[in-house]
Each structure stands twice: as C-alpha cells, then as structure tokens.
Amino acid sequence: MTQERLVAVVVTPSIAEATPPGVDAAAFLTAVAEDTYELVAGLDFVSPVLVTSVPGMEEIVWPGTPVVEIPDLSGEALVRAAFAALPYGGQAVLLSGDAPDLPPLLIGKLFRRLGRARVAVCPAADGGAVAIAAHLPYPDWAGTGFDDHDPVKALRAAAPGPRTVATGPGWHRLRTPDDIARLDPGLEGWDNTRALLSA
C-alpha cells in the first residue's frame, strides 16, 4: 500500500473566480471540479483522492474515493496541507481542481519524472503550476504554491541537488473568465463544464 500512486484533485473556493458572466458561480465550481476529478478517476494504476476546502464536494466523486477536508488556504500552505492530508501512498500528484480539460497523459509523465526526481511540476500557462508531484512524505525544502510565478525555479533554488526537481509538459488552468477561451473543444472529457457553458 505504501508504494501506491495517488492523484489528489485540490478543490478550493478560488476556482469560482473564473466564472464567466451569466453563469452561476457555485455551479461553475462544481462542474469544473467534477470534470477535473473525472479525468483522474478514469486513470489506470492510480488512486484518486479529493482534497477540498469547499463543502459538499463528496457528491462529485465515485463511491470509495477518499474525500479529505482541509482549511481554505493558498500558496505554499495549501500545497503542504494537501500533501500532508493524503491518507497513504508512496508517490502523489496534486492536481489543481481548475484544469478540466487536462490530457491524462500529462499526469503519467509526472510520475515518470519521479523515477529520477524527488519533485516534478506541470507548469501552468501564465505562470504557476497545474500539478505538483512528489515522493511522499513531501520534502521540507519544497516550498511553492500553485500560483507562484515560477514554481520550478523556486523549487530548484531550494533543492539539495540539480536533478531533484523535474518538469513535465505544461498546460492551462481556469483562473479568470478569459481563461475559458483556453479550453480545447477537440479534447474528450470536461463534459460538465462544456454543458454549463453552452447552456
């Protein structure tokens, strides 16, 4: 059990900040978080976990998925609390809950990076991280958050060795209403968000 790979979707109230005009913010947050969770739940060889500071999110997960509640945090404190809240596992990816159209392959690439590195990052367009992967327990020196401008640079500056931090291909998140235009209509998935935006 200790070597199990976890993918934890991190859901915070800030996801609602990307709600476009005319759309209910709570419905938008739920749709985006559910789509992000669904892409993880469909992966082979990993166990999904939902880490949330938003009440009621247990309704979006499949039976048997652990739902872990944490305080409403941001930055490094959020990342540390989310890693610390994981119930078990040898390696874990924290995935920001505002990436509903993320290609699942990118999560697999992060786990492959952990074959040589201690921490791996999927960078976000316009700065920050879409996902942060690490061997557990999460290292004390790894101080960064999802919205830090250059998390890879910050982690490498603090890392004990040059190969300790790896980076995978980047993607985008929904952080402002303008980011909705980044969603790729040609990709499968993100059905809940797609339906809400087209209603």
Image (spheres, rainbow, N blue to C red):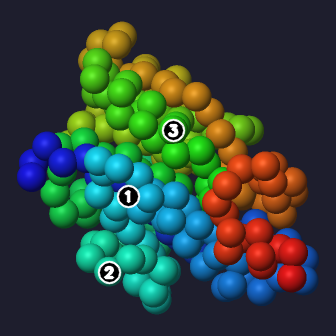
Is residue 56 positioned above or below 96 on the image? below
Q: Assess whether mark 2 and mark 1 are in contact (beta carbons under 8 angstroms).
A: no
Compared with 9, 131 (above or below) is above
State the quadrant of the C terminus: bottom right
Q: Which residue is drawn at 26% across and 63% down?
A: 85
Label 3, on which residue? 105
Say which residue appears at 52% left-offset and 45% top-offset: 104
| Of callouts 3 and 2, the N-terminal one | 2
Residue 153 visible to the viewer: yes
Dot 1 or dot 2, earlier in sequence: 1
Q: Mark 1 or mark 2, which is nearer to you? A: 2
For this view, does 8 lie left or right of residue 195? left
Report the front residue among 193 and 18. 193
Which image quadrant is residue 169 in? top right
**Image coords of residue 181 (percent x, y):** 87, 54
33 shown above or below 142: below
46 displayed left or right of 77: left
Q: Position of residue 152 (x, y in %)?
A: 51, 27
Q: In which quarter of the image is residue 59?
A: bottom left
Q: Which of 20 and 73 is in front in this view?
A: 20
| Residue 180 x %, y % | 82, 59
Q: Distance between the residues labelled 1 and 2?
A: 15 Å
**Which kind of residue does numbered mark 2 sit on?**
Pro
Q: Do the residues labelled 1 and 3 touch (CB within 8 Å)?
A: no
Disc marking residue 63: 2
Q: Which of marks 1 and 3 is in front?
A: 3
